[in-house]
Every structure is written in C-alpha cells, then in structure tokens.
Image: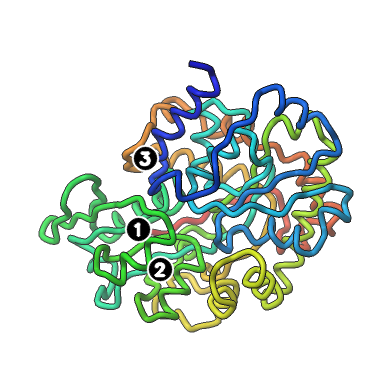
Amino acid sequence: MTGRDLTRRRLLGAGAAGLGLTGLAWGAGSAYTSAREQTLASADPSTPVRVGYLPITDATPLLIGHANGYYEQAGVPVEAPVLFRSWSSLAEAFLAGQVDVIHLLMPMALYMRYGLEADVRITAWNHTNGSALTVRPDVPDLQGLAGESIAIPAWWSVHNVVVQKMLRGAGLTPIMRRTPSAGEGTVQLLPMAPADMLPALNNGVIGGYTVADPFNAAAEAQSVGGIRRFLGDSWRDHVCCVTMMRGDLLRRRPEQAAGFMDGLVRAQAWSRGNRPEAAAILAERYLPQPRPVILTALTHDQDHAEVTVHPPWHGERIDFRPWPFASTTELLVRSMQETVVDAPSDFLQGLDPARAHEELVDDRLVRESIRRAGGLEAFGLSSTERTEEFSA
C-alpha cells in the first residue's frame, strides 16, 4: 500500500467515525492524479490555484475574492471555486492535491497535521464567529436538551468542542453511541452533514444542532427551530474555519501564494463593510440558499437579546479577521484534549499547544497582506496577541 493510499484510508476512516460526516460520494469526485503530475503542476507558476469550499457563510472571503477579481488583480490565476457537500470529501480532495486552498474546521486541520502527518499549513483565519446552537421550538433552554440528541458537523469541529462545554455548564453530560436519558441528564452527539440537519430537526429526529450559518438562519426563517446560543457568545471572536494551503503551493509557487493571500485579505476587508452586497453575490453564484437567509446570516439583525449572555461581544455576528492568534490555537488544543469524540485522538497525547501553533500555522503571508490592506485596524484589531475569553 502506497503512502498516499494509506493516508486516504486513514482519512476515510476518520470520515466515517472521526470527521463525522455522512459519506464521501455526496461531494465532488475523488479521481487522484499521479505524484508526477501533481509535482509538475505544482512547480508551474502559471498553473491556476484551485479552491474548494462548503456552501456555508464561513467560505465568504474565498468566494468574494474570486467574484470581485481580487486574486487576478494580485496576479494570481484562480479557477472557479469548487463546491463540496461534506467536510470529508473536501479534506480528501485537498490531501490528494485536487485543490490547493480550502477553508477547514480548525480542529480538523490539527488532525490533518498530527493525525495524518499531512503537508498542510494554516495561513490565515477565514472568519470569526458565524455559528450557533439551534433547537426545536419546544426546547425552552439548554437543560431542555436532556434526553435529546444534538447534531454536530464533525467530531473534530469547534462546534463539538464548544457545545460540550455549554452542556457541561448546564449540568448535562454529552455522550455518544447510546440512548440519551432525560433522567440522567445526558445528551447524545450525532455527526451529521450540515444540509441534513434542518430536515432532521423538523422531523423530530434531533433536539438541536450546532453548525455554521446559514443553516441556523434558515431554521428560523422556516420556523423549524430557534437559535438558543451563538457560539461567539460563548467563545469571544473564536475561529471556526481557517484558510489552509498545501505545503507544495507555499514552497513551489511562493509568489502565487502571497498574491492569493493578498486577494483573500482584501476580500475579508470588503466583506466586513459590504454585507448586503456580499449576500447577493453568494446567493447568485456560490451558495444554494436564498438571498434573504444569507443576508440574515451575515447580519443577524433580528433581536436575539433573550439568548445573549455577553451583548458587548456581538457573538451573533460573523466577522472576517484574518490574523491567526496563537492563544486560540493553544486553548483549542487543550480543549480538544478534554472533548468526547468517537474518532482517532492519539495525536493529541503529549501535543504541546504552543508547539502546535508554531508548526501548523504559517503567518508570514497574512502578516504582509494585512499590512498592505491597511493594518490590523482595518479589521477592528489592535494587536497580534490577545487573551481568550470563554464563558460556557
């Protein structure tokens, strides 16, 4: 068995039991190119950069950069972004070299680097906030989830990490692979593809789900469920999806990688100040959801005061801030080591949080791109360091 086949086999295993998704065939194809073809392509500076994404608002900067022509203006040819329907199919295509740049759940990025020993790097944050816990209309509060099941997008997701802290803070116990009990205060976690969550909630299969928008906004628009808590109201300005590049892109085409990052950061700055326009572009060209739902997801102008614990945090509002804070990586690694998962987790044993950030995150490109985009102030930031704020 070749090294590539072994990596794919481990990834597929994680996709079924670790990445927590519903199947690979649902997404794009998985035709592998040869190692020689990949090497030749990756060394050619005229080769277009290939982007993969899931149909969620977390992908906004990658998509707006393409729609507004920012990559081309930075001198980087970029193919039309390819939509994938599951995290596992996106991850597999990335590892196979079918796409060069993706947005990915940050815990899954850690799994790629340390569980699969993949040659990948986080080069920026793609966004902050943008996710929520949505529950059935008859679930009054977190305690009302006792005896219910909650869908999560993947075992290795910020959603799983944060919702488990929320449940424990409410006196509940997250479990897996067994029937939840209201009397015992247990809540079962079920990995599920995002697009399957809303129908499952509507049919009463689950009591709630935690996922990125626009699926939370869609539940409210269809009166299927209501947002119980925004994850950004629990972990202030947290990252969910990060921008990832393949190592060969960074090494063999450094000018392309730098230009792409310039376009991405420019798209983040534009998206922050042009949310209605961004919603229109996403609805027309990239996301299979209606414009009003996407606009709600980008603005959340509805009143959610009754479920907001920290109003000054504005955790209900997705934002686009590219700097990858080391403090977040470190807290995430420690939190992952405490999280219940039905997935390979040996890679976390003895993993030093500070070392993980140094090895996985390459911030050289984004640092320069932020400077060219007007500095940290253009993204509402004042420093490259911060203290994490978490409140279950």
Q: Residue at x 46, y 33 (%)?
A: 11
Mark 3 or mark 1: whose residue is earlier in sequence:
3
Task: First in sequence, mark 2 or 3: give its number.
Answer: 3
Numbered mark located on residue 229 in the image: 2
| Residue located beneath label 3 in the image | 16
How far apart are labels 2 and 3 at the CA level? 28 Å
SS at mark 2? strand
- Point out the residue furthest to the top here: 1
Q: Amino acid at mark 3?
A: Ala
Residue with the mark numbered 1: 166
Residue in the image at 46% along x and 62% along y: 231
Camera-side residue of 80 and 164: 80
Residue 120 drawn at (x, y percent) = 63, 33
**Chain-order first, disc 1 or disc 2:** 1
Please state which amino acid type lies under the numbered disc 2.
Arg
Establish if 129 lies above or below 275.
above
Q: CA distance from mark 3 to mark 1?
A: 25 Å
Q: Residue 51 at what x, y percent from top left?
A: 68, 48
The reply to whether the C-beta atoms of the residues labelled 1 and 2 are less than 8 Å apart is: yes
